[in-house]
Amino acid sequence: LFSEGHEDTIGVDFEVKSLSVDEYKIKLQIWDISGEGRFRSFLPTYISHARGGLFVYDVTEKTSLTNIDFWLAIVKKDLTKEDLFPIIAVGIIPDSENERQVSYEEGLKLAEFHRLDGFIECNVKSGEKIEKLFGSIAKLMLERTPPPPKPAITKLSRKVKRNALIAKKKRKKKKNKRKSDL
């Protein structure tokens, strides 16, 4: 969420967010890469292991929407089709609609034109739709790259654990007996 003293990102910043999606506990590392020209060369490094992307623009600045074309070109250039991760376009909305320069429809059209996986507008001051945004990207990421299956506890694995515990107790008992014999 936005705080009144928050400054625009200069360079790269990141946060960690934990959430639950279906039966999975997910920990997202959210990397914020500045849109400033001198930091654009960082993008390929940070996306090489990415599993999801949020292209964020400010609806009060039309140019921030058009910059998405540039960013998407970089992402698509550096990734193979198999490596391409889900991407959601995110419009940051102001408290006052009078400040808006980019309509909801324009943002939606951009997401559809680029065949992105979603589009949402959020208010970072109030937190409106922030949880929905992170839940949506996490769910899309799970669909594309499911986590490894949870290990099943079978009769055999229980028996192995029980036998190991019995053997450990026997060793301890022998060790204690040897000490008492001294």
Image (cartoon, grey):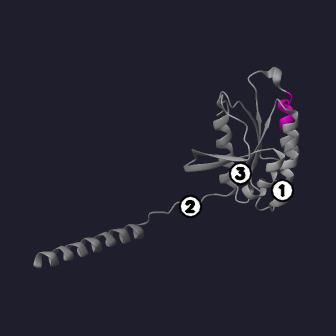
At horizontal 81% and vertical 47% (from top left) the residue drawn is 116
The residue singled out by tag 3 in the image is 52
Q: Residues within 10 Å of mark 1 (few under 14, many from 20)?
A: few
Kindly indicate whether the residue at mark 1 contacts the one at mark 2 (C-beta within 8 angstroms).
Answer: no
Determine which quarter of the picture holds residue 106. Answer: top right
Element at label 1: helix
The N terminus, quarter of image: top right
Of marks 2 and 1, which one's residue comes earlier in the chain?
1
- CA neighbours of label 3 inside 10 A, class few (<14), some (14 to 19), many (20+): many
Q: Amino acid at mark 1?
A: Lys
Percent coordinates x, y for residue 27 in the rendering: 58, 50
At 58% from the left and 50% from the top, the residue drawn is: 26
The quarter holding residue 178 reads bottom left
Q: Which residue is label 2 attached to?
A: 149
Which comes before the other along the chain, label 2 or label 3? 3
What residue is pinned by disc 1?
A: 76
Q: Indicate the position of residue 174 as horizontal and vertical percent values.
A: 20, 77
- Boundaries of the magenta span: 101-108
Position of the C terminus by quadrant: bottom left
Q: Please give the name of the residue rendered at 85% of the width and 59% of the height, measured from the top-left corner.
A: 77
| Amino acid tagged 2 | Pro
Disc 2 + disc 3, Cβ < 8 Å: no
How far is disc 3 from disc 1 in space, using C-alphas? 13 Å
Instruction: Residue 75: give x, y in percent of width and height.
Output: 81, 54
Question: Callout 2: helix, strand or loop?
Answer: loop
Q: Earlier in the sequence, mark 3 or mark 1?
A: 3
| Residue at 58% across, 61% down | 148
Q: Nearer the viewer, residue 175 or 165?
A: 175
Viewer-closest of 110 and 150: 110
Q: Is residue 170 above or below residue 29?
A: below
